Image (spheres, helix red, strand yellow):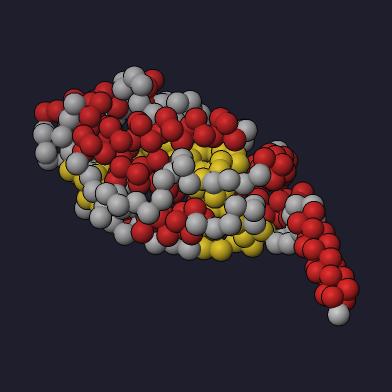
Amino acid sequence: MKTMRSATLLVCALLSCAAHAQPYPSRPVRMLIPFTAGSAADIIARAMEPQLREKLGQAVVIDNRGGAGGNIAADMTAKSAADGYTLMMGTIGTHAINYSLYSKLPYHPVRDFTPITLVGDSPNVLVTTPRVPASNVKEFIAYAKANPGKLNFSSSGAGTSVHLSGELFNTMAGVKTIHVPFKGAAESLTALLGGQVDFSFASLSSAIPFIKSGKLKGFAVTGAQRSPSTPELATMSEAGLPGFAAVAWYGILGPAGIPQPVVTTLNKASLSALGTKEVQDRLFASGVEAHPGNPEEFSRLIKSEMEKWAKVVKASGAKAD
């Protein structure tokens, strides 16, 4: 009896070791999306999924867990097992802005995560209604200074990159304009087109058709460089506000403590996927420029962005509790 028990224990131990020795990944990987289907983070993840599946040899299950400004998905990721089977498409909101915007964030953007790679970023564009008497950024700033508190701008919600781009503009330009939050990007843009607000820092991809049709005036993009999709639009720095840079960025992360070999596997698969023309074209069509890199670079970006936006949130007094 004792011999049989010992043999059984030995078999169980061997099976356990074999399970642990299986190369990663040996089962599907789940990627949490902090926003609903159709959001930029969702579009990016679904664009990458076929290539990631091919590179990893396993399915990548897209799981939309929207709510609380992205905090629900981020918290779920942070509390998952650190085995590389639960990832998320992090954003400037979940991993930079929300840390200062929410007084009781249930996770820490740096301590509780393992960065895999930055995926890319998407600039916004300063757009106004035709009735605003300005034709460029310098004239718009002059008009705002001459009319303190009279101009208002829309955003897709408090604490979004659109909102804080407006607050950064107020601070750097030395003007006072009023923020009017809406429930989403579509509502924000509709309000601008309907003349309910005067301007916005809208997403470039959604604003381009209205700029070209003359329904909106496009002054400048918020990136550090001009966007390849609209090379005729100057950057905010070029147009009269030196140093202004505010882009919505996206990146893949997992919970803290993922083994380095697994991180390396995920990083290589992600970079390979982002290097394909198919994925780049799909991202470009959504106004996103691919900027993959290594985990260390992504980690540095998160830390610097947290510091940058903490100052903007403090200056604006914005809160989302």
- 115 relative position to 131: left or right: right
Would residue 49 be seen by someone viewing this image from the given angle? Answer: yes
Quarter of the rendering containing residue 290: top right
Q: Position of residue 83 (x, y in %)?
A: 64, 53
User: Residue at (19%, 41%) from the top-left corner?
Assistant: 317
Q: Quadrant of the N terminus?
A: bottom right
Q: Position of residue 282 (x, y in %)?
A: 62, 48
Q: Position of residue 192 (x, y in %)?
A: 28, 50
- 273 relative position to 217: left or right: right
Q: Nearer the viewer, residue 304 or 107?
A: 107
Would residue 124 be seen by someone viewing this image from the given angle? Answer: no
Quarter of the rendering containing residue 14: bottom right
Q: Nearer the viewer, residue 168 or 238?
A: 168
Q: Nearer the viewer, residue 223 or 54?
A: 54
Q: Quadrant of the C terminus?
A: bottom left
User: Residue at (75%, 52%) from the top-left corner?
Assistant: 24
